[in-house]
Image (cartoon, rainbow, N blue to C red):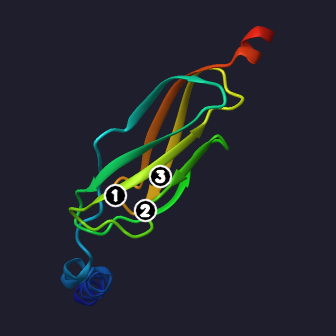
Amino acid sequence: MLFACSTLIVSCNQGTQKPASAEQTSVKGAAKFAFSEEIHNFGSLKAGEVVAYTFTFKNEGTQPLIINSVDAGCNCTEVKLPEQPVEPGQEGNIEVIYNSAGEAGRQLKTIILFSNAEPSQMKLYIKADVKNDIIEINS
């Protein structure tokens, strides 16, 4: 009876193990952002000015980098993404256009990129000090 129980336990455990070849067939590596700059300061702006900056990055990973979506946080910021995947070792550009209309004072805007890279979320920042005579006079 003891022999029958131990045979049953061994045969049950064998069915739950992953085959060694499953790890070998999985895709190795990932895409990886490497930005030359993650924060850009536009400096002093007069309310209503529209300015743009292009963030440059390199894919230092081993897979093509695909940006799936972006969260610019507000309607004052527009983001233009690469149209094609960025291959390993290649560079890509992300253009950020900021409209300072209706803004006043120090501004910090966060742009969140969602991608297949490791990590899957990347944050970029733009800063500006917006002078708005109308808002400042009425404050």
Sequence order check, earlier mark of 3 and 1: 1
The answer, for residue 26, to whether it is visible in the render is: yes
Name the residue located 69 percent from the left edge and 32 percent from the top edge: 101
Disc 3 target residue: 113
Sequence order check, earlier mark of 2 and 3: 2
Give the class, few, some or many, for how many residues have Cα within 10 Å of label 3's Cα (few <14, many ≥20): many
**Disc 2 + disc 3, Cβ < 8 Å:** no
What number is the disc on residue 82? 2
Left/right of residue 99 with respect to residue 24 in the rendered view:
right
Give the class, few, some or many, for how many residues have Cα within 10 Å of label 2's Cα (few <14, many ≥20): few
Quarter of the rendering occupied by the C terminus: top right
Name the residue located 29 percent from the left edge and 82 percent from the top edge: 9
**Marks 1 and 2, how far apart at CA:** 7 Å
Name the residue located 75 percent from the left edge and 17 percent from the top edge: 135
Q: Name the foreground residue: 38 vs 97.
A: 97
**Marks 3 and 1, how far apart at CA:** 13 Å
Q: Quadrant of residue 118?
A: bottom left
Q: Position of residue 131 (x, y in %)?
A: 62, 18
Q: Position of residue 35 (x, y in %)?
A: 31, 45
- Secondary structure beneath dot 2 equals loop
- Secondary structure beneath dot 3 equals strand
Examine the rendered structure and indicate whether residue 38 appears above or below residue 121: above
Disc 1 target residue: 92
**Disc 1 + disc 2, Cβ < 8 Å:** yes
Give the class, few, some or many, for how many residues have Cα within 10 Å of label 1's Cα (few <14, many ≥20): many
- Secondary structure beneath dot 1 equals strand
Name the residue located 29 percent from the left edge and 85 percent from the top edge: 5
Disc 1 residue type?
Gly
**Marks 2 and 3, how far apart at CA:** 12 Å
Disc 2 residue type?
Pro
Q: Position of residue 57 (x, y in %)?
A: 31, 51
